[in-house]
Amino acid sequence: MTSYRQPGVVLTDRRFSVPLDHSDPGGERIEVYGREAVAAGRAGEALPWLVYLEGGPGFGARRFTGTEAWLGRALREFRVLLLDQRGTGLSTPANRQTLPLRGGPREQADYLAHFRSDAIVRDCEAIRQQVTGGAPWTVLGQSFGGFCAVRYLSSAPEGLAAVLITGGLPSLDAHADDVYRAAYPRIERKVAAHYARYPQDVDRARAIAGHLAEHRPESAGHRLTPELFQSLGILLGTGSGSHQLHYLLENAFVRTPHGTELSDTFQEGLRSATSFAGHPLYALLHEAIYAQGAHATGWAADRVRAEFPQFDAATALAGDGPLLFTGETIHPWHFEADPALRPLRETAELLARRTDWPVLYDPERLAANEVPVAAAVYHDDMYVDTGHSLRTAAAIRGLRTWVTNEYEHDGVRAGGPRVLDRLLALVRSEA
């Protein structure tokens, strides 16, 4: 293990060997990475542990500098493990460069079937035995990390001292179709709010989409289509996302010797905001995180979108209405537009067809839960349906909710110490 310092914190790189398939402990093993953080001057103390599970799927744990955001508050009383979930960050990363080591698309899809929340929780339990000596720890789960925390409560509650969830209470039984059927109206509300704030963006968005439809340009290997442009709506679920989108749109066009063209600034911003190069598992497994039992996801977001024709770019451009952005929906065309995903198109198709997904949640066990749990539920969260979250909250015995419109889905980042303070107070309050 290697330790080093940043302002106010001592960090230690920790690596763990875990089974690829926990049902076959003697089989292939992979490496999982966690960054231990402890307040400077307290490294020798016997502090309780908090493990942080990042949102996603597909994102490694946030790389903090010093004690920024919620980490400083956590370090006042915990030793923190910032875990890169399997396949992300430094934990045996899975991407277009590494997955061919597994073989062809079929072998890649079979491999990735082991990268959902059930396996992540089994990793956590194996790691906990090593770092805490078997003592329970507290889990802080953001977004998909909260989905993992609910799986943890369903399968290994004995490992938990408490659970803190921010924007991540999943439906216990919704099919992927149900998730996206609830999502599109939320996305439409976010787009309407954006256009109300920045009415000049209505014409700008139509002009950009029209230009892309006519010219179909490529930029650094990315195919810039109207549908890719629409997917910038993923920004609208964060606290500053509407403003980021506005600033991107206002730089869209420049005059050149060849006429009006999309600016390099805009193209770079579009590529950056829509590329999956840094988190390909998000695209590959996003629908699979909702899969349970024998039901294939079958590109649910794409199929369900047909029920909401107002999101069709060609229809919008043919009329005089606003172009609607989309958000957190994965489509087959992503695997054509994005060069980081293009080699994985067949693998994604096989995952979409898969019908042998394990059930993730145990309603009976959750109804008998004895672990203190608190969850921040963000009013009209664009990424996780509030109605689904509140139904799940009611199904988990003893869970306490903080429903707020003060923050968007990234509240644990924006609100940091205050959000963590509120959740800790809830799990520690008497019933």
Image (tube, rainbow, N blue to C red):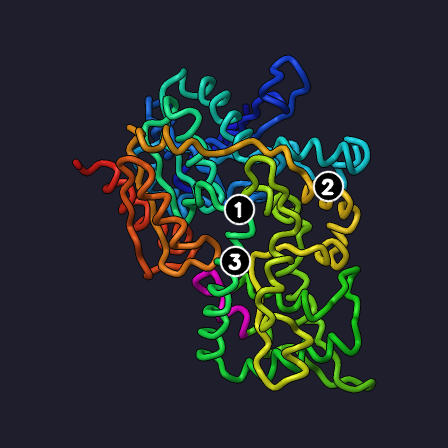
Q: Specify the label residue 133 is tagged with.
A: none
Q: Is residue 114 magenta?
A: no
Residue 245 is left or right of residue 425, and the answer is right
Q: Position of residue 287 (x, y in %)?
A: 59, 47
Q: Position of residue 343 (x, y in %)?
A: 79, 47
Please say if 412 is above or below 264: above
> Can residue 69 be seen at all in this image of the molecule?
no
Where does label 1 land, which residue? 175
The N terminus sits in image quarter: top right
Circle 3 Cα neighbour tier, 10 Å, few/some/many (<14 / 14–19 / ≥20):
some
Q: Earlier in the sequence, mark 1 or mark 2?
A: 1
CA distance for labels 3 and 2: 23 Å
Mark 2: amino acid: Leu
Please say if 285 is above or below 407: above
SS type, badge 3: helix
Q: Which residues are magenta?
A: 236-246
Is there a contact, CB below 8 Å, between mark 1 and mark 2?
A: no
- Quarter of the rendering containing residue 44: top left
Q: Position of residue 289 (x, y in %)?
A: 55, 42
Mark 1: amino acid: His
Q: Position of residue 120 (x, y in %)?
A: 53, 31
CA distance for labels 3 and 1: 10 Å
> Can residue 345 be seen at all in this image of the molecule?
yes
Where does label 2 land, which residue? 350
Where does label 3 land, which residue? 181
Residue nearest the observer in this picture, 318 or 284: 318
- Quarter of the rendering containing residue 92: top right
